[in-house]
Image (cartoon, coloured by chain):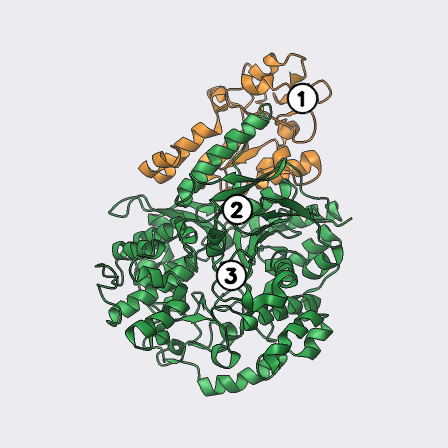
Amino acid sequence: MTFGYTGKIAEVNLTTGKITDIQVDEKILKDYVGGRGLGVKILWDRLGAKWEQVDPLGSENLLLALTGPLTGYIFGMRICCTGKSPLSNGIVGSTAAGEFPMELKCAGYDGLIATGRAEKPVYILVTDDGVEIRDAAKLWGLDGKDTIKEVNKEVRELLKKRKPNYGLWKEPALLYIGPAGEKLVRNAAIMQKWTHACGYGGYGALMGSKNLKALVAKGTGKLPDVYNQKMLGELISKCWTAQFGEPQDRNWGTAAMGYSTGAQSSAEPVRNWQEEWHNEKSMGIVQYETRNWVKRYWSDYGCCKSCMKLSVVKSGPLKGAITDSPDYELEAYCGTNLGIFDPDGVVYMAGLIDDLGMSGINTANTMAYAAELFQRGILTKEDFNGIEPKWGDPIAMTALAKMIINRKGIGDVLAEGTYRAAVKISKMKNVDALQYAVQYKGIEVGAHGIRTGSHFPYLGYALSVQGGDHTSIPRPPMSEARSTIGDSLVVCTISSPPGLRNIEWEFFKAVTGWDMTAEEWTNVNGKRIIQIQRAALLLGGPDLFWEPDIHDDNPPRWYTPLPSGPYKNAAPNRDQLMMERKNVYSLMGWDEKGIPTSEDLRLLGLEDVDKVLQKLRN
Amino acid sequence: MPVLKPWIVRDYIKCSGCRLCEIACSLKKEGRIWPEASRIRVFMLIPGAEVPHVCTQCSNYPCVGSCPVKALSVDEKTGAVKVDDEKCIACGACIKACSGEVPHMHPEKNHIIICDLCDGEPECVKACSYGCISKGTRSSSINFDLYAIKPEELTKNLAINLYGEKGEELLK
């Protein structure tokens, strides 16, 4: 008996309409657990041998939405979406919080795999009765709020019809795309609720390429049996007691960082990272909490932390906008990085970007990039079809966002994401436009700068297998493996109660009965996931290939000294970093070219990966 | 002074949507986590406007009166509705009789489930740290029957309370 798993994953072939239940071998579950780990394994097994030829937006790519064994048992559950990334051409484990994973489990599934491509827009519905493909013609084109509204209505009516005596049906949970994903905006997100995004990786575009508007689940079943129910009950109670005993710990979530990461740490993006310092007191958390927050505590299922808050613009020209906190990342990317420093403007932009199904970090990075090119005169009003994307102007930024999702004018180029747009604009305008692009291997960077030397590590993003993803970077002892456990279990890494930082291992034991330590995970299981991801990233293709020598590096902007603030003139020394990189490569089990070594791969049992990488070694 | 019966006090706007109440209820009643078997269910028909939905113990107990097989009764001490699982034929008459459509079927077994107030010490309120639900009493000046109300109706109110005019559009 495998505890903590329902034991089946539904595979839906959208081309043929065939739906199959697949079972995953217990040995593979033990090794890869779920979410990111299991996704990486499945992707590699199916596509590894022909990785470079697989078009991420072609029908041969897979979309995986996977839960983990702790889904529903532990605070802060998330879903992990993955596939061959349309942005990095590698693999990104992209997670978002919400109720979808719980509903999927309660309907009897550990995950969903979508293959092929539907001829017309569809959505996949998972209920106690199984999996079905349904028409999504009337959902196509809808924004997030309308998509949820319409799906709720349709599915609740359907369930009522099917089981009229059940009583009131609760709402189903959705993973869906907005207009951005439909239009194959490469950094579009897969969304949950209104505001929770699987942002990194561009999986919204992958879903769009399959004509798949949403994955919808409503189950009434119980969670799977666990190894030790008593131990689990005690852990839950321990977490609640710890969290309830420290009310201040959940007062602000990450939202208080919108001021402090700029003003104190000098690591917040300001106007496309031209600066990382600001002292705009209007961004102080006290402003948001008193002006915009209509709910101080807003949670997803099972979370006792409530880092999300619910924000509304109540008056003025932007009235009616709704979003969560915004959390730090979106305060930065939909705020300071667009030159917007007033809470109403930031709430509005974050809400808009979520509604359109863009990624609040990634697409917003592209928007700021475009605004800088406008500031520098590289892109002109004509390129923008008459709009002027000036810093700090939410209305002009809205027009820009709409140009991107409608692929109008320069929006068609920007819809390819910051890196691809930069390459294209460089050619179009005969300038080096890449120097202003702040991204890593196609993935726009998270809102945490490195230039001060104290906020995020100098080589973190450069060596990450998930590019600019701020949640997955190697940290001393130069291992990225630690990040893979959160994404594989699939739990939230910031929702653990105070003082209980590593308690997920205890939950893991109570639920699955398997013994695993953080150390073992770091050295074996997690490392295995990282090595496969590194292999996929280096293989890349078909439109782009990364060369470690060039691309395992920071963007030029981050070698430019900080122009302002307490860390004025700070910047890493590139020559020194490139020397250091060699040592780090070997710590990560990579050779001097940055390729995972045969020795390391064989030790991890990844002979198949080793074989495929042989062509890169010559 | 007569001893007042217990009641689950609701302050809807404070619901965070964490559903720890559902977890607590299903752990107590079913020995495991099982959201749909929870006697209190949180509806999220509009994100942000979460509504905990649970029995209010009406003064005239229309559900009890509607039961064709007398499977429902009222607990003398707490005033809670008790379900005789063996007698219940899962016909759904009590759901229709309730103006809030509060009762729902056990997702696996063939009987209705209704909050029994855990014999006066509701487990759900212990899990709510936001003051959305708490343990109180049935004082005589309040008409508790009015809390037998559908989540759709409360969602509308809450959406307008939270989002203003924008809330009107969200439930159209």
Which numbered disc, 2 or 3, marks the residue that appears first in the sequence?
Answer: 3
Tell me the amino acid under the disc marked 1. Val
Give the vertical position of A579 relative to B19 (above or below). below
Of residues A269 and A551, which is closer to you in this image? A551
Report helix, strand or loop for mark 2: loop
Q: Residue B62 falls in which quadrant of the image?
A: top right
Question: In the displayed structure, does residue A292 sit left or right of residue A448?
Answer: left
Identity of the residue drawn at 63% across and 63% down: A44
The location of residue B91, given as percent across then percent down, is: 63, 18
Q: Mark 3 points at which residue?
A: A56
Cα distance, mark 1 to mark 2? 31 Å
Give the vertical position of B20 relative to A87 (above or below). above
Q: The orange chain is which one?
A: B
Question: In the displayed structure, does residue A372 sit left or right of residue A102?
Answer: left
Q: The green chain is which one?
A: A
Image mark 3: chain:
A
Cα distance, mark 2 to mark 3? 31 Å
Image mark 2: chain:
A
Label of residue B83 in the image? 1
Q: Name the residue under label 2.
A: A300
Tell me the amino acid under the disc marked 3. Pro
Count of marks, rendered view: 3
Report helix, strand or loop for mark 1: strand
Cα distance, mark 3 to mark 1? 55 Å
Q: Badge 3, how many Cα within 10 Å: few under 14, some, many 20+?
A: many
Of residues A271 and A234, which is closer to you in this image? A271
Q: Badge 1, how many Cα within 10 Å: few under 14, some, many 20+?
A: many
Of residues A10 and A50, which is closer to you in this image? A50
The location of residue A336, given as percent across then percent down, is: 34, 63
